[in-house]
């Protein structure tokens, strides 16, 4: 077979439908929990009375205005939108019009993403990416409720023989591989990664689940874990794309699952890691179907697709745009990569695969204190900041913007001064609303920069003190002192 025919064959092959729909079911469950988490965040982030000054971001970044949000949305609007998305995620799970369902879910997710743009993070980026791919992938031909109600247990024989075009799945998996490889290579050039120190600050920053347990005496173990995770990220694509049945490919599966379980156990980033692990079903789709076909007779054989449909063509275009966009941080490529980036960001697909390579430049351990002096009293009442502000990844992203920590969005000059003035006011408003009494509130935040020379946090901590008076549930006279 000539090289041209081999390339053509790669684009026109078929695959079995069942593994994609198993992944669809897992992702459907994931969507239910994801949209439910967004629903629970409405009062803190989506609400106009919450922590984010949405109008500030809409004023300065035009592409955020391209969404389904009315000019003056109420909390009820977001409850309806995200409540509907939570319920309709079950349609994706059940295989009921999965493409149409994915379109609605993607629009709901990207709308809220643009509205809350300053606090989106890797979970949002991964969920939106997979949702968009499900618009393009030919899912739903198996493991759907309608066929099961019609044929009962006999559906399994039909499903085990259902075929779909493979090109969309191949491109989706290459997108997953690119995430691993690009994120790993970016880390290679980051100082804390190549010195083996990176995981120490990562496990101490506010998104960590284990920050209370990490001590300086763990540094050597953490150094081994740092190099191991860096090696795994770079090598995984090559292992997962090995031929069917390869022992190295199964090694890749073991490393993939171990890698993501470690992240889930230590960092509050569950959705992205579960979605990435779920993609293993597609990397091993041939092995999985060999197992199923041991018990079910193969009626049909995989053949060539005669004609590429529109979904496959759009999948190729989307793949090129995503890969091009993520290279925008590479010098000399930025000018070209900015074009697909703008196209995708307008559409609501905002991708950035610089995952923790920034830890050398931006890392903080934050200690917070707060107390309240009621009006007419001299006694201090200690407050637990977690009772007044959400202890979440989103809140920590919101707070860290005050200290110029960025991800996806860079704010400079007058825009930054405006934002840094607004953040304390929003925090103060949250305290006053929840305290419900008149009096003075004192907030103290100590920021420790985490480096190999300051792993015990004794050098030059940065302290920020802010006080304000609560009157009728609203802050007055806010000032730094």
Image: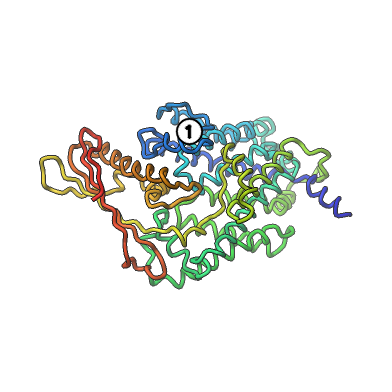
Q: Quadrant of residue 25?
A: top right
Q: Quadrant of residue 238?
A: bottom right
Q: Quadrant of residue 39?
A: top left
Q: Position of residue 280 (x, y in %)?
A: 63, 53
| Res 78 visible | yes
Q: Quadrant of the N terminus?
A: bottom right
Q: Which residue is painted at 85% across and 51% down in the image?
A: 4
Closer to the camera in the image, 399 or 305:
399
Compared to residue 232, the image places residue 303 above or below, namely above
Closer to the camera in the image, 339 or 425:
339
Label 1 Cα crowd, 10 Å radius (few <14 / some 14-19 / many 20+): many
Q: Which residue is painted at 52% across and 57% down in the image?
A: 261
Compared to residue 114, the image places residue 224 above or below, namely below
| Res 145 visible | no
Q: Position of residue 74 (x, y in %)?
A: 40, 27
- Label 1 element class: helix
Q: Which residue is mark 1?
A: 82
Q: Which residue is painted at 71% across and 40% down in the image?
A: 159
Question: What colouring style does the render use?
Answer: rainbow
Q: Position of residue 145 (x, y in %)?
A: 63, 33
Closer to the camera in the image, 83 or 147:
83
Drawn side of residue 450 relative to residue 227, left or right: left
Drawn side of residue 323 relative to residue 48, left or right: right
Drawn side of residue 23 relative to residue 272, left or right: right
């Amino acid at each position: 077979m000539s090289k041209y025919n081999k390339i053509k064959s790669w684009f026109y092959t078929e695959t079995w439908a069942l593994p994609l729909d198993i992944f669809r079911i897992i992702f459907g469950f994931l969507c239910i929990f994801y949209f439910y988490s967004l629903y629970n965040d409405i009062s803190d982030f989506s609400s106009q009375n919450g922590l984010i000054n949405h109008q500030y971001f809409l004023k300065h970044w035009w592409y955020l205005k391209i969404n389904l949000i009315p000019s003056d949305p109420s909390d009820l609007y977001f409850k309806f939108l995200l409540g509907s998305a939570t319920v309709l995620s079950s349609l994706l799970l059940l295989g009921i019009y999965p493409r149409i369902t994915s379109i609605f879910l993607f629009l709901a997710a990207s709308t809220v993403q643009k509205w809350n743009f300053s606090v989106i993070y890797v979970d949002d980026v991964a969920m939106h990416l997979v949702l968009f791919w499900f618009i393009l992938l030919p899912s739903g031909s198996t493991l759907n409720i309608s066929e099961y109600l019609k044929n009962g247990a006999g559906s399994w024989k039909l499903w085990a023989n259902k075929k779909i075009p493979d090109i969309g799945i191949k491109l989706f998996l290459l997108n997953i591989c690119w995430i691993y490889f690009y994120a790993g290579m970016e880390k290679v050039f980051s100082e804390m990664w190549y010195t083996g120190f990176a995981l120490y600050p990562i496990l101490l920053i506010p998104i960590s689940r284990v920050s209370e347990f990490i001590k300086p005496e763990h540094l050597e173990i953490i150094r081994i874990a740092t190099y191991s995770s860096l090696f795994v990220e770079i090598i995984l694509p090559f292992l997962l794309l090995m031929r069917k049945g390869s022992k190295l490919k199964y090694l890749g599966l073991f490393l993939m699952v171990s890698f993501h379980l470690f992240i889930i156990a230590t960092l509050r980033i569950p959705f992205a890691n579960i979605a990435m692990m779920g993609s293993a079903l597609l990397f091993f789709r041939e092995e999985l179907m060999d197992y199923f076909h041991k018990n079910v007779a193969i009626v049909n054989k995989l053949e060539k697709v005669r004609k590429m449909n529109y979904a496959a063509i759009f999948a190729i275009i989307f793949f090129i745009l995503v890969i091009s966009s993520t290279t925008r941080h590479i010098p000399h490529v930025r000018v070209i990569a900015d074009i697909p980036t703008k196209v995708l960001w307008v559409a609501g697909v905002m991708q950035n695969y610089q995952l923790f390579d920034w830890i050398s430049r931006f890392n903080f351990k934050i200690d917070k204190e707060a107390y309240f002096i009621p009006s007419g009293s001299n006694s201090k009442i200690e407050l637990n900041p977690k009772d007044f502000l959400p202890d979440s990844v989103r809140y920590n992203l919101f707070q860290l913007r005050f200290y110029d920590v960025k991800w996806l969005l860079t704010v400079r000059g007058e825009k930054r001064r405006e934002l840094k003035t607004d953040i304390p006011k929003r925090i103060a408003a949250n305290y006053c609303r929840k305290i419900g009494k008149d009096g003075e509130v004192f907030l103290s935040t100590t920021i420790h920069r985490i480096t190999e020379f300051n792993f015990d946090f004794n050098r030059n901590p940065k302290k920020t003190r802010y006080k304000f008076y609560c009157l009728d549930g609203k802050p007055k006279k806010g000032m730094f002192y």
